[in-house]
Image: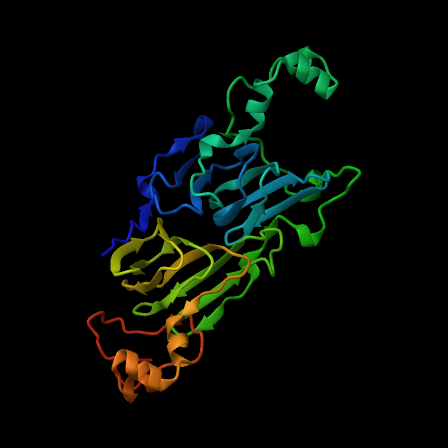
Amino acid sequence: MGEVSNAKWPFGLSHNRHGLAGAGWARSQNTDQLPSSVAMAGTNMRLSPNAYRELHWHKQGEWAYMLNGSVRIASMNEAGQTFVDDVQAGDVWFFPPGIPHSIQAFENGCEFLLIFNDGSFSEENTFLLSELMLRNPTSVLAKNFRTSTAALSNIPQQQLWIFPGTPAPKNISEQNVTGPAGAIPKEGAYTYHWSQQAPVRVPGGTIKILDPSTFPIASTFSAALITVEPGAMRELHWHTTSDEWSYFLSGSARLTVYEAPAASRTFDFSAGDVGYVPVPNAHYLENTGNDTLVYLEVLQSSQYSDISVNQWLGITPRQILKDHLNVGDEFLDGLTKEHDFVVQGSRDLTETDFTPESHGGA
């Protein structure tokens, strides 16, 4: 009566596009790999020490999560206000559509995720400064920049995209250039130092949430960084307004997706995989390994939220549940009115009794 579309894409299967002179690489996922991922696409990018992702802009909004290393980003908005900041592992940035920016790695290089609010996004369609210069007559460039054509004789004759650079100054103030409009105010900052935000402990793991209430510039992006202990699971839930794009940082997991009218499908994930669940399909994520599962959930939403099946049933009148599910008081007594996000389990994946007083329960 139905079939659940593929919900998994390993970045390791994506084509690696390499930058100039070993300066880095990028590999992408969009609707070509996951046809259901119509709302979001992802890119995994690596920059070698001191390398640049050249000055560029996109038609789409760019939300980024730093996986390792550190970078300096620089940008300017439509008002001519400037922004420069250093970000490290666990931090995020966001550039609205059309906002130009550059990214430069420091001496140890870096790796990060880019998530775009368009499932058909392709790195090949990025607007590049090098291409802008190449696609206009030199005489026009000279007139525009109030210089001579001779001064432009050495501009690059190919895309730079990802390319080697000279080391950025350690003191960020040396690159804090402003014009008459000054700098972008704090409330409009393009970065958020999420690495400094403490996670909330929940049964079986932790959760750390970021949405426009704390990062206003990313007005349509919400995210959660979730850890799930061995044997525990991200509880059964669904989202009401957004598809879910996920990236697995470490550990292994099992996901089952339920889609109306009568279909479900199970997938296994490991580090480096992308998951995608369309709204409002119900799903869970179970840690099937011996190590803590760490993964990122990204939504196109002004608030991070979901419907918890545990909480929904816990606040539904008992008579209604008995009529629907043919269950007794033992089941009903175990329900919770809280929104726990993660529920505890057992490292023994053959365990079937999860009542609190049992060996496998909380």
- Give the percent coordinates (x, y) of residue 85: 63, 46
- Give the percent coordinates (x, y) of residue 230: 31, 67
Q: Nearer the viewer, residue 359 or 5?
A: 5
Q: Residue at x 44, y 78 (%)?
A: 338
Residue 234 higher or lower than 134, as above or below: below
Residue 266 higher or lower than 168, as above or below: below
Q: How many numbered discs?
A: 0
Which quadrant does the C terminus fall into? bottom left
Left or right of 203: which side holds 138? right
Q: Quadrant of residue 211?
A: bottom right
Q: Residue at x 63, y 42 (%)?
A: 170
Left or right of 144: which side holds 40? left
Q: Nearer the viewer, residue 25 or 186?
A: 186
Left or right of 223: which side holds 188? right
Residue 20 higher or lower than 294, as above or below: above
- Give the percent coordinates (x, y) of residue 81: 72, 41
Which quadrant does the N terminus fall into? bottom left
Judged from this view, the residue extending furthest toward the right is 180
Q: Residue at x 60, y 47 (%)?
A: 86
Whether residue 178 appears in this view of the structure is yes
Whether residue 23 appears in this view of the structure is no
Q: How is the image coloured?
A: rainbow
